[in-house]
Image (tube, rainbow, N blue to C red):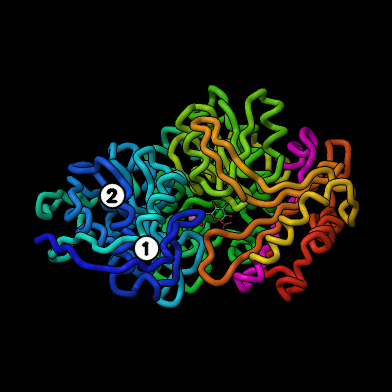
């Protein structure tokens, strides 16, 4: 029986950079998840009888919310729900399933790189029929609806068994429990030269992949160990756990320390990689050689033609604004357009749909292509492996070669976490107020050439997104960018992105901290970070 349940708005359900992210305790309030799911459905048109994909990264609350989504989908008139077995679907696998099944859209349950568990984070994100995150006009509609919602619809029914592959009927709706891995692994096999990678591994090339006890475990075991023949144990932390084994499933040098230490050891494997909670990010470390995500994007773009799926070349490259300009130089050399978008994968979808870009990336360890409409951690690892199998060089040699050709963009991101929200807002407001007076002034970073608040006009539909981050550009091409995170669940996080370019004939072998020291000082001088936040150093440097 369909129930219509009276409810009240929670007033805090505006989707951020990638959907709604809150503490588990917030999601556990009566009606909370239901309200958001209904706000999503109320903002959509024409889904009667259509298919909805649902799955998540396996974190705490995943199973409970999946049951809610299934029963609400039935009550709201969807014709079919496709759910990953055990409630599991990595974000890129969900994107692929939406596309390949012709679904109307999908709900992905994850807080990505944020920790999981009863005291940690949960999230819900809506993806549209192209497989990508809902664009701003949809997320704005969801936010508006969530402020006036007064009821939701749910089917009164027993829970559906989501652990057995098969089909069940729920009132007028069909529920299909599908293998979360097979289709995705087939897609990967269609893009990359698996025989070449398999031969390389059989010849003694060694790798380590850290799933961080999150969703990629089953995908990585199937692809790296079963299909590519890497020995058992290649995949570390390969079982998805509801609390990610108390790890913070963010693949960076701080949280993927186990992998990092292994890659810096005397007997390190040739190649190491990690992915995040929901499988859309990637960390790449060669033996004794860390690759920044911005550099990784540039190397992948420059070498993509070596993989079968990209042998026809690239239509264009897109990167988020704070991502370094390393990819710009590759685009220039390839003679293809470079698009600079706001942070968050939702801005790439239109470019990919329009065939304007093939490869996209973000400084936060997200890289992907037009094969799905999300960033894709395992995809990036496989493209690296394919390139290494063809070039027969080490990661370190490939990086040296890349910088010698294109120059090097020294780069770091400094995060100041858990700042009181009003303090962070005051800092940003003061910076905004100073923008007009900055050009022409000098500080430790040099002379400021321009300063602005990034606004983006989508070339496909002319929609405009404003206030996407403050950019301060110096005469020598160096850059400092400030923005507030849209994915945190505690206070505010200030992200400061610092970049300096050195040409092919310049000093390519500096320590990143040394190369960026004057710009780090400039960031403090311009924004008075310590004055506003009371913090004299960042919480995390990546
Ligand atoms: C962060 C990253 C951004 C990424 C987003 C979602 O957003 O900076 O590049 O797209 O997370 O990634 P923010 O607003 O906190 O800076 V995921 O892997 O958490 O879905
Ligand atoms: Co993620």
Task: Determine the residue positioned at 80% across, 63% down.
Answer: 524
* Quarter of image, ligand 1: bottom right
Q: Is residue 344 visible?
A: yes
Instruction: Identify the residue under disc 1.
Output: 58
Relative to the observer, which residue lies in front, 314 or 125?
A: 125
Q: Magenta includes 215?
A: no
CA distance for labels 1 and 2: 14 Å
Please state the extent of the stretch shown in magenta in the rendering: 398-424
Q: Residue sitting at 59 percent across and 61 percent down?
A: 259
Say left or right for 189 vs 306: left
Answer whether residue 415 is magenta in the image: yes
Is residue 388 visible in the rendered structure shown here? no
Q: Position of residue 112 (x, y in %)?
A: 47, 59
Q: Mark on residue 519?
A: none
Residue 468 against residue 331 in the figure, above or below: below
Image-based side of 350 in relation to 130, left or right: right
User: Which tag, 1 or 2, sits closer to the chain's start?
Assistant: 1
Give yes or no for contact between labels 1 and 2 (Cβ–Cβ under 8 Å).
no
Q: Residues within 10 Å of mark 2 (few under 14, many from 20)?
A: some
| Residue that numbered label 2 is attached to | 179
Residue at image coords 14%, 63%: 3
**Label 1 secondary element:** loop
Of 226 and 429, the residue lying toward us? 429
Horizontally, residue 170 falls left or right of residue 373, namely left
Position in image of residue 64 (x %, y %): 28, 67
Q: Secondary structure at mark 2?
A: loop
- Is the N terminus in the top left, top right, bottom left or bottom right quadrant? bottom left
Q: Residues within 10 Å of mark 1 (few under 14, many from 20)?
A: many
* Image quadrant containing the C terminus: bottom right
């Amino acid at each position: 029986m369909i129930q219509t349940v009276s409810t009240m708005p929670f007033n805090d359900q505006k989707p951020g950079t990638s959907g709604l992210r809150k503490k588990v305790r917030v999601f556990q309030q009566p009606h909370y998840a239901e309200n958001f799911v209904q706000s999503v459905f109320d903002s959509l048109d024409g889904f009667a009888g259509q298919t909805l994909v649902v799955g998540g990264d396996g974190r705490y609350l995943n199973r409970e919310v999946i049951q809610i989504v299934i029963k609400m989908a039935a009550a709201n008139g969807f014709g079919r729900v496709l759910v990953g077995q055990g409630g599991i679907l990595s974000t890129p696998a969900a994107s692929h399933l939406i596309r390949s099944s012709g679904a109307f859209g999908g709900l992905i349950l994850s807080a990505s790189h944020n920790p999981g568990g009863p005291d940690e984070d949960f999230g819900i994100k809506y993806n549209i029929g192209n497989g990508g995150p809902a664009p701003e006009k949809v997320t704005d509609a969801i936010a508006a609806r969530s402020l006036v919602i007064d009821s939701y619809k749910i089917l009164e029914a027993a829970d559906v068994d989501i652990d057995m592959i098969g089909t069940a009927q729920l009132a007028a709706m069909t529920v299909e429990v599908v293998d979360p891995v097979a289709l995705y692994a087939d897609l990967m096999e269609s893009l990359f030269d698996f025989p070449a990678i398999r031969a390389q591994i059989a010849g003694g090339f060694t790798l380590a992949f850290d799933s961080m006890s999150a969703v990629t475990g089953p995908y990585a075991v199937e692809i790296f160990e079963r299909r590519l023949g890497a020995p058992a144990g290649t995949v570390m932390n390969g079982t998805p756990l509801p609390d990610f084994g108390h790890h913070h499933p963010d693949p960076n040098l701080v949280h993927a320390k186990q992998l990092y230490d292994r890659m810096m050891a005397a007997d390190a494997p040739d190649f190491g990689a990690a992915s995040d909670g929901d499988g859309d990010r990637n960390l790449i470390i060669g033996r004794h050689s860390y690759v920044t995500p911005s550099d990784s994007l540039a190397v992948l773009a420059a070498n993509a033609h070596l993989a079968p799926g990209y042998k026809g070349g690239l239509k264009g490259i897109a990167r988020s604004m704070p991502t370094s300009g390393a990819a710009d130089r590759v685009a220039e050399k390839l003679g293809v357009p470079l698009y600079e978008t706001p942070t968050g994968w939702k801005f790439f979808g239109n470019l990919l749909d329009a065939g304007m870009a093939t490869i996209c990336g973000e400084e936060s360890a997200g890289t992907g292509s037009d094969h799905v409409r999300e960033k894709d951690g395992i995809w990036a690892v496989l493209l690296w492996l394919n390139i290494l199998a063809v070039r027969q060089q080490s990661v370190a040699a490939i990086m040296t070669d890349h910088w010698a050709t294109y120059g090097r963009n020294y780069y770091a991101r400094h995060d100041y976490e858990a700042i009181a929200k009003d303090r962070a807002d005051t800092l940003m407001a003061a910076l905004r107020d100073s923008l007009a007076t900055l050009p022409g002034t000098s500080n430790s970073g040099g002379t400021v050439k321009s300063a602005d608040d990034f606004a983006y006009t989508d070339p496909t539909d002319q929609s405009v997104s404003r206030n996407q981050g403050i950019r301060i550009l110096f005469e020598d091409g160096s850059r400092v960018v400030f923005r507030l995170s849209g994915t945190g669940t505690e206070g505010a996080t200030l992200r400061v992105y610092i970049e300096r370019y050195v040409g092919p004939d310049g000093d390519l072998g500096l320590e990143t901290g040394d190369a960026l020291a004057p710009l780090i000082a400039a960031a403090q001088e311009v924004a008075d970070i310590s004055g506003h936040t009371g913090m004299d150093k960042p919480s995390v440097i990546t």
